[in-house]
Amino acid sequence: MDPKKTTLHYQLPSKNCWTHVVTQPKTNFVYSAQFNAGRFHNGFSNKPQGFTWSLLKWILSRKHASWAVDREQIFARQQALVHEIPQARPNADLNDWKVWFIGHATVLIQIGPFNFLTDPVWAEYAGPKQGFGPRRMCPAGLALEQLPQIHAVLLSHNHYDHMDLATLTWLQKKFAMPIYTGLGNRAYLPKSWNVIELDWWQVAECHGFEIVYTPAQHGSGRGLRDQNLALWGGFCIKLGSQYGFFAGDTAYANHFKEIHSRFGAPRFALLPIGAYEPRELMRYVHMNPQEAFRAHQDLHAQRSIAIHYRTFQLTDEAQDAPERALDDAMKHSSKLMNPFYCIKEGHKLKV
């Protein structure tokens, strides 16, 4: 690819899906043990009574854009960097695994010749329309045009900073790949797309891999009438006895120990470390860095990579606070502990 001849998109205008705010989707699934009284529920601990009201009061009273950063300078500096970009690898060995951090919860996973993309978000705003919702504060580490052939998308849940219709539409036009996601999320996507819905612990086959949808402690919803009408979760990508783990969006709970009990230690784990303040509210839906480190230990991950920080200001902590807190947790751990990395957008780790 010649970048002088190709327009590179490091962000996209957010797609207008304002109807998601006011309508209730019509979901279509037969049964789930997680679904009761018209909603999905967490399997470990549910939010306390009054949580929604407390969350609303916080949203209405908080300062939404307190990160003291020069967005234009960050974009200019990031896009001026010259770094390696992923390549198509049709002859790569299946033991050759690479992980590229693109930003927020978007990660390119290369296993041999196959390429998986988690929660792809290139939108400028994490909201139902351009100009609404938290604004992107740093560009994606790769332009959309720099992606190799995508064989599947792993879509953890339907919150706007994870389910981005602008990006998914771009990818569908280019790659027409299948999308694996939780029960009920198909209702938000065009009917012509190949969407495979899964319940927790359900398995689907993809190019010889087992895609396992795993539990998470979180929630779902894109508007006023659809709270917890679709399932949320993470993914294991299994190849024989080895697997990679993408946690999606989650609070800390016992599911990390259960994943290890079922599948052993992952070759890599993608664990969220941001969007955790105020703690009295966020502890029910997001891990802080210390809890992410506990999850890393619970999984016995050979290595973990931090996600879900630095891109969108979703909560009250400073932009660099998650990375600093994780670094402190690692410093106070055993020197024999497996590594937990924070890597910059656009960079890769051979795993």
Image (cartoon, helix red, strand yellow):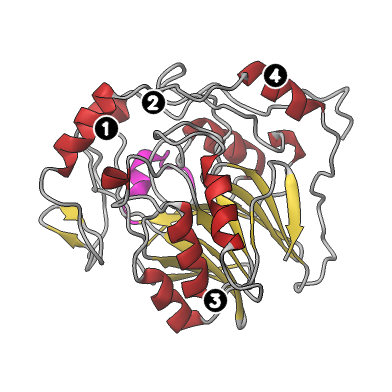
Q: Position of residue 252 (x, y in %)?
A: 37, 61
Is residue 235 toward the left or the right of residue 34 in the image?
right
Residue on which disc 4 sits = 73
Is residue 106 toward the left or the right of residue 91 in the image?
left
Q: Position of residue 175 (x, y in %)?
A: 65, 44
| Picture quadrant of residue 332 | bottom right
Crowd class of label 4 (few under 14; some 14 to 19; many from 20; radius 10 Å): few
Q: Nearer the viewer, residue 253 or 164?
A: 253
Cα separation, mark 1 vs mark 3, equals: 37 Å
In the picture, the disc for residue 128 is 2
Q: Residue at x 71, y 34 (%)?
A: 143
Q: Nearer the viewer, mark 2 or mark 4?
A: 4
Please say if 237 is above or below 160: below
Quadrant in the picture for the C terminus: bottom right
Residue on which disc 1 sits = 223
In the picture, the disc for residue 300 is 3
| Picture quadrant of residue 4 | top right
Question: Which amino acid is tagged 4?
Answer: Gln
Q: Position of residue 52 (x, y in %)?
A: 18, 39
Quadrant in the picture for the N terminus: top right
SS at mark 3 in the image: loop
